[in-house]
Amino acid sequence: MNNSPPRQVPIEDQAQIENIERHPRHIVLAWDDGQRSTFHHIWLRDNCTCDECGDRSGGHRYLELGSIDPDIFPDDVSIDSSGALRIRWHGDSHLTRYSPHWLRMHAYSDQAIVARQPQTVFWDARLNGTIPQWDYEQIITDDSSRLQMFEHIGDYGFAILRGVPTEADQIEQLAAVFGFIRQTHYGRVFELISTPQQRILAQTAHAIRPHNDELFRDPIPGLFMMHCLRASDCGGGASIFVDGFNAALKLKAQNPEYFDLLCRIPIPHRRFLVDEVDDVALAAKWPTIELNSGGKIIAVHINERTMAPLDIDAELVEPVFHALRAMLNLVYDPEACITYGLEAGQAAVLDNHRVLHARNAFNGDRHIRQCHVDRDEFFSRLRALHRRVGSDAQFREYV
Ligand SMILES: [Fe+2]
């Protein structure tokens, strides 16, 4: 940002190596705060950050894995006068040096990996009345405030902003804080106002049930943002948000078989509008719940309005319908929903891979502009902000 204050120096983990244990295929570092980290010889050789080898942690690599002996071991391992780990490798006597900070940031013990995971906060209707608002002027001028707001989106899946100017094209500047607008068949920005000849439900004044957006696209748009230019003057039209992760956890507790089915079976979604006006024939398939390799929920994709006819194994048809009904009951449950009446000059930013949105019926006066940006750019900016103004203790891997 041009008008940002001077950038701060990141607060680094200051832990020092106290002791090195040698083992046949790995070393164990004992740190002065009591932690212990195992590093395998091949991992230490592969990650060497010298000018000759490149930098795997930054994605700039010269050394090829195939050129490393899988049974490589060091002739010497020591701590140098600056506290760095120094390794002299057997064979070619290549020298590798790691700062304690680098090793702490890349340690792969269970404890270290858990500490770098997002601190997901699961929520439901009890969050109503305590939803924080972020001041738009502050988040665009102050890196630390913007980092806090980005982390809030990482932890909760959404954020509400206030003080967003109500010029019609302001959403372009708002989106630019988070990433690049993802253009779709609606264009760059979609107008949420009722029109006499509605083609899709969003353009009517009817209530809309909680859903994730655009599941017929690949990739699914990442962050979804709504900028309110004019609230309904007769009431109604409040936005409703639902934590899809919390609903998925509840489903897992209620019925592990349904949860497993929704993690495994891709559900088809479609948006077909092929006529004299449109030429849209979008189709994609996604499991309703997505897990990472550690079994952690990393995405929820559910929208019964855009579900296409199921085309799955015959014996799975009925069980999948039961599982979908159970999940839909959880995301439609009023106890899962927070309600927020966006006022003019307010905006909501949602992670469309986690938070479902809905709205109450309204009288047609409301005017909201909406757009999407992709998540990779948002998380890139979040990590970069951590590098610049965060502390190592706050760092999270949003992958
Ligand atoms: Fe939507």
Image (cartoon, helix red, strand yellow):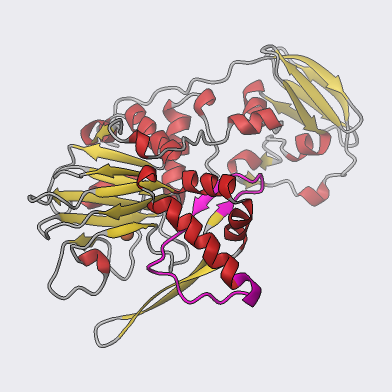
**Residue occupying the point 51% across, 51% down:** 299
**Magenta part of the chain:** 290-316
Left or right: 101 in relation to 34: left
Residue 44: image location, x then y, percent: 76, 34
**Residue occupying the point 77% across, 38% down:** 43
Residue 114: image location, x then y, percent: 62, 32
Give the image quarter of residue 156: top left
Question: Is residue 181 among what the camera can see?
Answer: no
Q: Is the residue 93 above or below the residue 220 in the image?
A: above
Left or right: 39 in relation to 9: right
Q: Does 388 appear in magenta?
A: no
Q: Is the residue 87 above or below the residue 254 in the image?
A: above
- Give 313 or 114, whichever is nearer the viewer: 313
Residue 298: image location, x then y, percent: 54, 48
- Give 129 or 395, whichever is nearer the viewer: 129
Q: Which quadrant of the figure contains the C terminus?
A: top right
- Give 230 or 182, whichever is nearer the viewer: 230
Q: Is the residue 291 above or below the residue 191 in the image?
A: above
The dominant secondary structure in magenta is loop
Question: Is residue 344 among what the camera can see?
Answer: yes
Q: Does 305 appear in magenta?
A: yes
**Residue occupying the point 88% across, 38% down:** 72
Q: Which quadrant of the figure contains the N terminus?
A: top left
Residue 33: image location, x then y, percent: 66, 13
**Residue occupying the point 54% across, 44% down:** 249
Left or right: 202 in relation to 96: left
Ligand 1 resides in the quarter of the picture at bottom left
